[in-house]
Structure formats: structure tokens, C-alpha cells
Image (cartoon, rainbow, N blue to C red):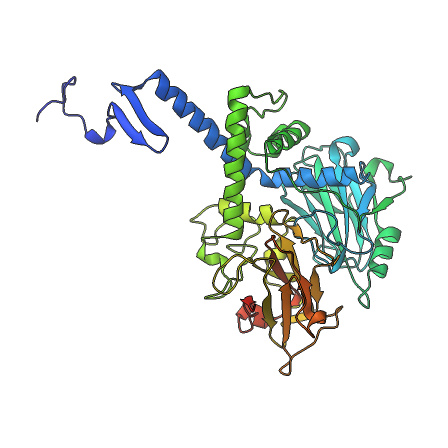
Amino acid sequence: MTKTPGFNFQIPEKIMTPDTVPTRIGTLSFVDGVPTDETAQTVYDHLDFLRGVEVFLNFIPAASIEGLRLGNVARGATRSNQAAIYDQLLDSAPLLLTGNTDTVYCAAFLDLEADGPTVVEIPPACGPGTVNDAYFRFVVDMGIPGPDRGAGGKYLIVPASHTGDLPKEGYFVARSPSHVNLLILRGFLVDGKPDAASRMFREGLKIYPLSKAASPPPMEFINSSKVFFNTVHANNFEFYEELDHVIQKEPLDFIEPELRGLAASIGIRKGQPFAPDARLRKTLIEAVAVGNATARTISLRSRDPRARIFENSQWMTAFIGGDYQWLDGDGMGGRNLDARTRFFYLATVNTPAMAAKMVGKGSQYAASAADTDGNVLHGDRTYRLNIPANAPAKDFWSLVVYDPQTRSELQTSQPFPSKNSKRDKLIANGDGSVDLYFGPKAPAGKEANWIETIAGKSWFTLLRLYGPLEPWFAKTWRPGEIERVD
């Protein structure tokens, strides 16, 4: 056996590093395996860039919760007993990720650090409600999918670290690893109107510290319909500053060491100021731009074949893999990070009920951002979508149009860029199907079925089935594709 020069024995070539290595970040140079000064700086710059991109992609859930919290603060809701309510439904004025126009939202933020164990009293007949922690992880359902099963009741949200005594009965108890928790409730329309749901929340919802149960502070409801404000996280350098606020606020162990270390690698560390120098700041500005582009690509142009609900279709599922924790069903793939990124870049609220098959209960979702040929949807063109007869929705179906920039409702002259099979007087075809039209102008005679779009802007849509029935899950019923008609 011949010797490798400089060694007593033949060294496998696969473990050796050449003096120069061409790569996508340039030619890297080594002195007998030791990086030169220039190569070391190049590699560290690239490592900081990679970490910046990964921080963006992995912490979208945390930044999104922070964006929602800041939105509530902008409306004057700074304490847990102050709730933002959408008395006249969610129209296109507020920026809120893919919200619906069909239920009355009521949202409040709990602060378990300030208040300790917190009571949430849910009125009877409340629609689906959920508490999520500061990383958008599921804490507990309320209302119809919750343990009260729509009968109403008292929930007690307790810090995970709490060791004091708790009531032994009278409460549905759930623990949360974070201080900040989002409470989001939905109320159903009655006779197509939001009044009953709004009144239900205003008269029946109560939030207060357990320590003040004998004399709880009065609720304050802030109507947030028809008002412009932002709840969406930043897509520039400010994203990292939003995340830093979360890390500083929350307990050290509210996220696992792996994620903490990822944030710390770019200077976001609990108990220390986030103050990147000029070099790192420049790198992170580029990293967040690439992270944003990556999230948009994963979200709106998914390459995962499981994203498609039907064969040869542009309709995509919200939960790739069908698991609310984005764990692949066979366990072999671990957590699907792209699927998690995709969901939280487009949506809010995480609950098993959204991913589970519940015939006749809850809701199911299908999203489309392309026409039949896979082309981006343009606001200056006219499209048609056929909703076949006998849509498998026990309650109703709805379709809402969104702006891909904001992932919020498209802002047009129509306050509600949507159609609802129960509320709207849609014109049906002879076979019972309904053709919906999208474009800058309504086709003649189709005004009732028309959703306005804007020249120069793209759009995408979500189809919701409320009370989904078996034909949806069996895929024996499927919506048509979005077809260009002009």
C-alpha cells in the first residue's frame, strides 16, 4: 500500500480537504485543511446568513402571535379582560391572516405572568374556540370542539410552572408553557346576521385572574370591524426585533434548547439586548429577505405532492400530512418543517379540530392560488369557478379572496371579498351548481355571483366547508378549477 504524502499510511481520499474547493459561495481555500482567513470570514458570513434564514422560517409562529398581540394593543386591548370583537364580521379593513367573513371573531390575550392562573368563562352555544401559546402551539379547545361541547363553562389556563393549589372541580384546566396566550373564539351567524353571536360574547364571555374570582374586573369589548390595523408579522429586519420581544417576555424553557440556540446564534438571547453589529445586521437583512421568499414559495407554490387535495388540481390542503403538529403519519419523517412554515405564513390558530376528520362538524379548507394551467391569478383578468351541486357542507360553504402580499382579505370596493351559500343570494345553474366570477368588472347578469379583483394585484382564495360531509373526505365531490374566461 502506498503512503499518502505527509502520512505513514494511505489516507482515504473521502476524508481529505483539497487546498481549493469551488462552491456556490465562492472558492474556499485551505492550508493543509486549515481555512485561510478569507475563507473563514466567508464561511462565518454564510453561516450567519443560513441561521438568519432558519430563524425566520422556524419562528414564524412566534412572530405571528406577536403580530396579533400588537394588533390588539393597537386597538386598545392591553389586558386580558379587554377583547377585540368583530361585531359586524371581519371585513377587508384589518390585516389578519386569511380570516373568514362568516363567523364573529372575539380575540383576547392572556398574560399568565401578570395574572397567574386565568379563568375564561365561555357562554353556551359558543362556536369553535381555541387557546394557543406564544409559539402558536395548541393549549385547549373551547366551545363546540372543547370539553364543554358547546354547553359553556369555566376554563382555567395555568402556567406550566405553577405549583400552587388549584380548584379541584368546576373548571376545565389546561396548562401553557408560555406567559402570553391567544384566546380566539368564533360565533355563528343567526339568520345570516352577526347580532346574536356578538351579544352572546358581550353578555357571556368573562376573563379574569383566578385570584380575583370573587370580584372579577368587568369585560371591555372593542369593536374592530371596519377599522384598519395590522396584525401580521414583519417580513423585514423588524421580524427579528418582534421575535426578540417574545424571547425576552417568555420563560426560558417555553421553547426547546434547539430553537433557543438557533435564535441565540444570531444574537437573540434571553436576558441580553439584541444589538447586531453593522456586519451582522447587513447579513440578517439579506437573510430575512431570502427567508420571506422561501416562505412565500413554500406557501403559494408548494412542491409537496401531498399538498394537492385532488389529482390534476390546483386545490391545496391547509394541513400537509393531516397532523396539527406537522408530524408525518408514519413517524419516519419527523416534523415536516416546510408544512409548518406554510401553514403559519398563511394562517393563524392551531387546533387538532382543524386537521381531524369530523363529519358534520367543524370546517374543512381548500386553497387555490393558480388557474387550471397553474398560472398566477391576475386581478385584471376574469375567471370562473364552478361549485357543483350538493356541496358537502351541512351548514354552508363560503369562498373568500385574499391578497398574497398581506395574506389578508383583498381590499376592493367590496368590504367583504367573499360569497356565502347561506347568506348571499347566489344565482344557481340549471343543474344546481353555482358559477362564481372574479375580475375587475362583473360579467353582465352575473353581479350576484361576482367577487371584485384589482388590476395590478394578484389574489388567491380559500374555500371553506362548514359541517363538512363524507363526500368531501371521500373525494367523491370536488370543486371546479379556476378558469380564465376573458
Residue nearest the viewer, comparing 47 with 173: 47
Give the percent coordinates (x, y) of residue 454.
65, 56
* Quadrant position of residue 58: top right
Does residue 148 appear in this view? Answer: yes
Q: Is residue 349 above or below residue 377?
A: above
Q: Give the number of callouts.
A: 0
The quarter of the picture where the C terminus appears is bottom right
Q: Residue at x 59, y 38 (%)?
A: 235
Q: Residue at x 49, y 57 (%)?
A: 307
Q: Residue furthest bottom?
A: 430
The quarter of the picture where the N terminus appears is top left
Give the percent coordinates (x, y) of residue 180.
71, 36
Q: Is residue 261 above or below residue 309?
A: above
Residue nearest the viewer, comparing 243 with 410: 410
Does residue 265 appear in this view? Answer: no
Give the percent coordinates (x, y) of residue 289.
53, 36
Q: Is residue 320 above or below residue 294?
A: below
